[in-house]
Amino acid sequence: MRYAVPLIIAVLSLAAPSMSRGQVPPLVIAWQAPVGSDAAYGYVKTKCQTTSEGCLNCPNNSTQFTCFLSNVLPNISGVGFVIPWGEIDMCSSSGPCASDTNCHATGNCYSWAWIDNALMDFINASIGPSGSTKPWSSGCAGNRPCKIVLIVWLTQDSGNINVFYDVPNTPAYVFSQQYANTVYAGTGCGSTCAPQDVVVCKAWQGSNLDSSPQGWGVAAPIQDTCWATGGTDVGLWNAQGAHKLKYSGSCMSISSLTGNYSGYPVMYEKPIVTASQAFLSALALHYSPSCPNSYADSCGNGPTIAKSVAYLRVGPSSGGEDYPYCSSSSAAVYNPTAGCPVSGAFWSGPRGFSAEQQCFSDQGYLTSWPAAMNDGAGYISSLYGFLSQQSWAFPIDTPSHEGPPDLTSIAYADTEALLASQNGLGFGMQAASVGDLVTNATQYFPSSGANWAVHAREFPYVPVHHLQTMNPGNPTQAARFTIATAGISSSGLVTCTLDCSVFCTAPPWVYISGTSNAAFNGIWEVSLAPSACGMGTIQLTGTLPSGTSNGGYVFSGAHLPLLLPFETQNCQGSLATVCSAELWEETLDWAYGTNTVSSTGGDNGSGDPAYQTAIGNFLLGLPNATSMHNHMSTNAKQY
């Protein structure tokens, strides 16, 4: 169905700021910015080739990093940087590293240089085009100091295997029997305390059918041949054994334990909670003015970097987000009469598989475990309480995310936003799209993806309201595709000159403009059915206009001229609240006519003035923050 663009969104003047005196300026963050020569990973050596990659503002042989510094960073607020726990906590196979207070003497410091070296490349860089560069302290939009957003990944974000580049994203020691015995010391379990569990299912398969997976090196003890064809088997393993939780036929097989823990960790069990809290406490100390020394292997550049950090987000699960993969197949409600296992649940309870097999519950994950279990506060409630008690040098932010099964539970996002507000933490979501304008106008609940627009209004007085836009294409990112000669058929099939089927991704929204039949111009929902996502096409859904059309363009759901004004109008709060738009680098490349990421698709461009205006207006706080809910016109089923 088509959704007409609300008239309230228009090109706005950059002449006068809208922010109140003393208000924290909004931020536009490049959360996937290319990194410099001292980074431990990334596409640092990739050259920006004018002829082959459309890097229209980059000299030949410049790197993507220098191209970004010259052409993108001067127009925005700063960069985002992922902190993968496992890359930093690598001192021992039996336990965590030590904090900066005393690690230099004992030689077991966290590997802070993995982060700090890359961030210092930004802080020490000259920003802007040749001949008119500025330092980091005044090099970003409006001559303001550039900022850093840190995003902590306790587990891998996606991709089936809990590994970041070349090492486990969750440190391998967390899964060892030795570490379990350490964290349970004094409880009477001796040398057989409950080790950390990992779970695998179709949505998170671990290193399934891979005999030498990256980061783990050896095959996982559970393999399943039917996940590829839709199988619903679920398995669990830990340092003591592997188990089939749900299976049919002979698809799932179990072999000897190997030291591979690539499945999804049960995030609230004691081993991972104890280790992650130690890491987060050490992180708070490292990036603070009170870090007690200047040794390169401990405090080092931490205090310097801390001055530039706008906020830090901690992802409770799934990278910087919060989705407990493989936890349940339905709403998981604990029945004290029946006890464990809970119907539909696969994760163990907080005390592990041997004591609380398949005892996951939505209530326990979010707020508190049922009284009959005697396990106390829930995972999210405990984590947010812990974060609020640390001595941070900057605001702390959290994700609000739909929950299981299959991202259908808005109650998760609602509860997470409430808990964040109660603990003085910021919140937001990571898949904002132009579809949010539609749902905010046409449906009461949820008003937007993960209900973020309602949360921003209901819980305004928090330190951060962030929105990360949806992935603009999967597996290849793109900002825009040209509609081919075949155009748009009467059945709503859009044919592009290049492969726009990458826009068949959730959330399923695109923006169409410039067509010969104006009835096709607007926001559209697209079908995600595999049969509707053929090469070079997307299928529009809902009530279609009469006739066909040719010409025009299809933009991704991260279409900034519509999305950023809507975010401004819904981001409300105190003068201290940071309104932040976290943008994928491909979107920024389209805005400024560069190419600073690899493996992108769609049309090449020399810069999009409408995108540039949207970013500039957002940074000024334009349009003024008002509710847009009553200002969108609708026309029956054509919105």
Image: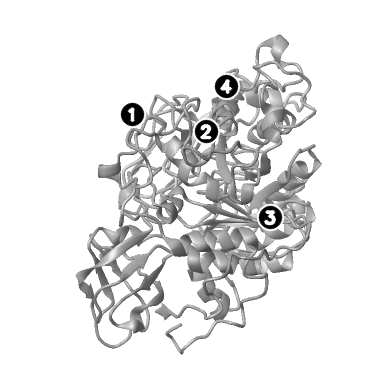
What residue would you read off at disc 4?
A: 90
Measured as percent of width and height from the top left, residue 204 is found at 44, 45
Crowding around mark 1 (Cα neighbors within 10 Å: few <14, some 14 to 19, many 20+) is few
Residue type at the position of mark 1: Ser
Q: Residue at x 46, y 26 (%)?
A: 37
Q: Determine the secondary structure under disc 1.
A: loop
Total tally of numbered discs in the picture: 4
Neighbourhood count class around disc 2 (C-alpha, 10 Å): few under 14, some 14–19, many 20 upward: many
Residue with the mark numbered 3 = 25
Residue in front for this viewpoint, 625 or 495: 625
Nearest to viewer (mark 2 / mark 1) = 2
Q: Which residue of the protein is positioned furthest toward the front in this rendering?
A: 131
Q: Nearer the viewer, residue 191 or 154?
A: 154
Name the spot of residue 197 as percent of width and height, x first.
56, 36
Which tag, 2 or 4, sits closer to the chain's start?
4
Judge the density around disc 3: few (<14), some (14-19), many (≥20) Cα neighbours within 10 Å.
many
Q: Which residue is mark 2?
A: 169
- Disc assigned to residue 211: 1
Question: Camera-side residue: 55 or 305?
Answer: 55
Percent x, y of residue 587: 44, 54
Find residue 575 and report its horizontal and vertical position in percent. 78, 59
